[in-house]
Image: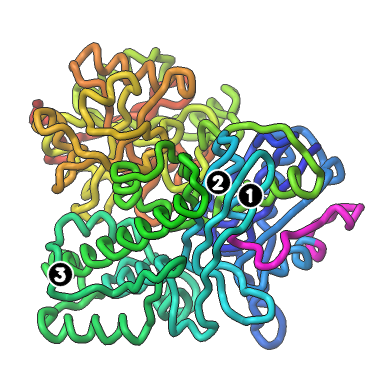
């Protein structure tokens, strides 16, 4: 049975599932090269906004599977608030049998998240906690989903508790609370009209930057708590947040302007980020403890955009009460397409087969001919030859930066050894060089290590495995001086553990680097420049390689260099460790 799930929210995406197993999935932004790929078009005489299907993603998935649109058994979509996904799909999708187009029952959005998390986990039972910014409207109330707790067993998911917020957004939940402070910090990717986006931000709020800056802030108990945790609910109101921020700014924020360049250097900004982080951690801890009380399970599936907060996830892992935790790598709305496909298979078609999503590398592979075609188009600017993995490891050990393009692309915001930029974690200059020279982003932002699974415990204080870079354990104190490029200011690192059985080529690279250096990890960041999506195709990879100060590109079996390249001043290789 073939089910296709379509996410029509921001980060539009498509998933194709066969008998409960994801065979291919992709975010539309990887194909249309528009960050977050909202999909709004202005149509008609009155400039009405219309939502479009992720047609590039639909075609991509069908082509990867070698099927046509009419071979599908079901197509299921989802979008927050009023949904209406079935109407949009029927309008634009050229499928002959219109009865195959379905949608989830209302309220639908958190249910789609729950299906994506649980049915990707491999657990046979679990508590499922969904926490995001905005869910669906609750029928008959006009209120909007805030967070939800489910019990999952076998192939069934039962709603145990759901909270909602006021339709005028005067009260809301953890996701919007964090976005409120992210807007105050000016961490925004601009798009569309200047009034669009949460809190009139004029774009997408980049909460990951708030999380990175929080470690530089001071705890502020004198500012008082913002959240009220009452049973299954967490209450925070917009007037209270606005009043608190006004008071803090009047007392300590003189001269602070989030629109100014390097505004994040202000201690006030750092303390705001820390306050937002402390509050979201307190709220999440309350919800997961409540989920444990309601379910009695020892397993947790955490999903929704707030589940991408790896610092908060680390507290949940370290402090309990769950023994096993699964966090879907595309935990935000990009993963909703997986949940839609799973709902179609299990709930509508009655499927029973279970399959685990071990890796988010759910994109299609690219042939050697496709790689060579992209390289030949750039032959005037590049030189390349076939190389084995130990040669790449030698370059990394010599402090060269490398674009790594292998296999299918990852789904979600983390690059996990398929579409990565790699570097030497030992060099003290590497983080600033990558941030400022290569990726053109704020220098306070940390980088993650990809570490051999079997050696991770020697270097990091890990309570559970961290295959998806969604936990931030402490780097062991005796190791921090050896890997300064991946050690954050608070002594933590956002770790990815790499198993040979899951990604053998990446594991081989890290093992080769380990033999040369004695360090069983590499620095790993996403293969993209600031403001652009992670690369998808060989052509994307070559373009980004040529446009940035990456030293080499390893794509398929080919090691690529730039002709007549002059190494930039301050390159880490000019000052060896």
Outermost residue toward the right?
Answer: 97
Q: Distance between the residues labelled 2 and 3?
A: 34 Å
Q: Find residue 470 and report its horizontal and vertical position in percent.
A: 37, 43
User: Helix, strand or loop at disc 2?
Assistant: helix
- Per the rendering, the mark at residue 432 is none
Near mark 3 (Cα within 10 A), the count class, few <14, some 14-19 or many ≥20, is few
Q: In which quarter of the image is the C terminus?
A: top left
- The circle drawn on residue 221 is 3
**Residue for badge 2:** 117
Q: Give coordinates of residue 395: x percent, y percent.
A: 26, 21
The numbered mark, 3 or 1, whose residue comes first in the sequence reads: 3
Q: What element carries label 1?
A: helix
Q: Could you say where residue 243 lies in the image, as x and y percent from the top left?
A: 27, 87
491 or 29: which is nearer to us? 491
For discs 2 and 3, the disc positioned in front in the rendered view: 3
Task: Write the start and end of the magenta stretch as one range.
Answer: 90-110
Q: Does the magenta stretch include residue 495?
A: no
Question: How far across and down, in percent of the image, does residue 273 sit?
Answer: 23, 65
Q: Residue at x 46, y 44 (%)?
A: 327
Q: Is residue 31 visible?
A: no
The answer to whether residue 68 is above or below residue 162 is above
Q: Judge the density around disc 2: few (<14), some (14-19), many (≥20) Cα neighbours within 10 Å.
A: many
Q: Distance between the residues labelled 2 and 1?
A: 7 Å
Q: Residue 339 carries which label?
A: 1
Look at the image and tell me in which quarter the N terminus lies: top right
Pointer 2 with pointer 1, Cβ within 8 A: yes
Residue 90 higher or lower than 150, as above or below: below
**Residue toward you, 163 or 177:** 163
């Amino acid at each position: 049975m073939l089910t296709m799930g379509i996410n029509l929210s921001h980060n539009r995406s498509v998933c194709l599932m066969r008998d409960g197993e994801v065979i291919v999935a992709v975010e539309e932004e990887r194909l249309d090269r528009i960050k977050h790929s909202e999909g709004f078009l202005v149509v008609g005489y009155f400039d009405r906004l219309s939502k479009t299907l992720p047609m590039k993603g639909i075609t991509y998935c069908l082509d990867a599977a070698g099927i046509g649109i009419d071979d599908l058994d079901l197509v299921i979509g989802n979008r927050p608030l009023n949904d209406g996904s079935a109407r949009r799909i029927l309008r634009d999708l050229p499928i002959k049998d219109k009865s195959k187009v379905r949608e989830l029952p209302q309220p639908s959005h958190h249910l789609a998240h729950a299906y994506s998390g649980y049915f990707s986990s491999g657990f046979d039972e679990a508590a499922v906690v969904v926490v995001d910014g905005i869910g669906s409207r609750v029928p008959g109330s006009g209120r909007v989903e805030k967070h939800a707790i489910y019990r999952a067993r076998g192939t069934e998911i039962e709603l145990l508790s759901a909270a909602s917020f006021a339709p005028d957004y005067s009260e809301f939940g953890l996701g919007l609370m964090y976005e409120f402070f992210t807007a105050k910090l000016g961490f925004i990717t601009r798009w569309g009209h200047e009034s669009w986006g949460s809190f009139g931000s004029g774009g997408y709020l980049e909460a990951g930057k708030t999380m990175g800056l929080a470690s530089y802030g001071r705890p502020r108990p004198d500012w008082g708590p913002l959240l009220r945790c009452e049973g299954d609910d967490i209450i925070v109101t917009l007037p209270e947040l606005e009043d608190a921020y006004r008071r803090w700014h009047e007392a300590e924020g003189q001269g602070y302007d989030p629109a100014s360049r390097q505004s994040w250097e202000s201690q006030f900004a750092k303390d705001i980020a820390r306050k937002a982080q402390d509050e979201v951690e307190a709220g999440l801890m309350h919800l997961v403890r409540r989920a444990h009380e309601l379910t009695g399970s020892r397993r947790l599936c955490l999903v929704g955009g707030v589940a991408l907060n790896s610092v908060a996830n680390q507290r949940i892992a370290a402090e309990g009460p769950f023994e096993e935790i699964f966090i879907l790598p595309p935990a935000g709305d990009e993963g909703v397409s997986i949940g839609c496909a799973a709902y179609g298979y299990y709930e509508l078609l009655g499927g029973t087969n279970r399959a685990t999503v071990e890796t988010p590398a759910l994109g299609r592979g690219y042939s050697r001919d496709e790689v060579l075609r992209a390289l030949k188009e750039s032959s005037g600017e590049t030189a390349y030859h076939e190389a084995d993995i130990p040669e790449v490891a030698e370059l990394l050990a010599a402090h060269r930066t490398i674009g790594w393009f292998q296999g299918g692309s990852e789904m979600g915001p983390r690059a996990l050894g398929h579409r990565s930029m790699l570097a030497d974690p030992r060099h003290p200059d590497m983080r600033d060089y990558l941030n400022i020279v290569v990726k053109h982003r704020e220098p306070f932002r940390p980088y993650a290590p990809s570490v051999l699974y079997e050696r991770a415990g020697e270097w990091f204080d890990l309570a559970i495995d961290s295959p998806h870079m969604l936990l931030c354990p402490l780097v062991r104190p005796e190791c921090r001086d050896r890997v300064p490029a991946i050690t954050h200011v608070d002594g933590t690192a956002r770790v990815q553990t790499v198993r040979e059985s899951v990604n053998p080529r990446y594991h081989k690279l890290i093992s080769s680097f380990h033999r040369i250096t004695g360090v069983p990890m590499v620095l790993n960041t996403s293969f993209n420049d600031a403001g652009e999506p992670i690369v998808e195709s060989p052509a994307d990879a070559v373009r980004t390689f040529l446009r940035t100060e990456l030293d080499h590109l390893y794509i398929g079996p080919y090691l690529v260099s730039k002709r007549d390249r002059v190494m930039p001043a301050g390159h880490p290789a000019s000052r060896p460790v």
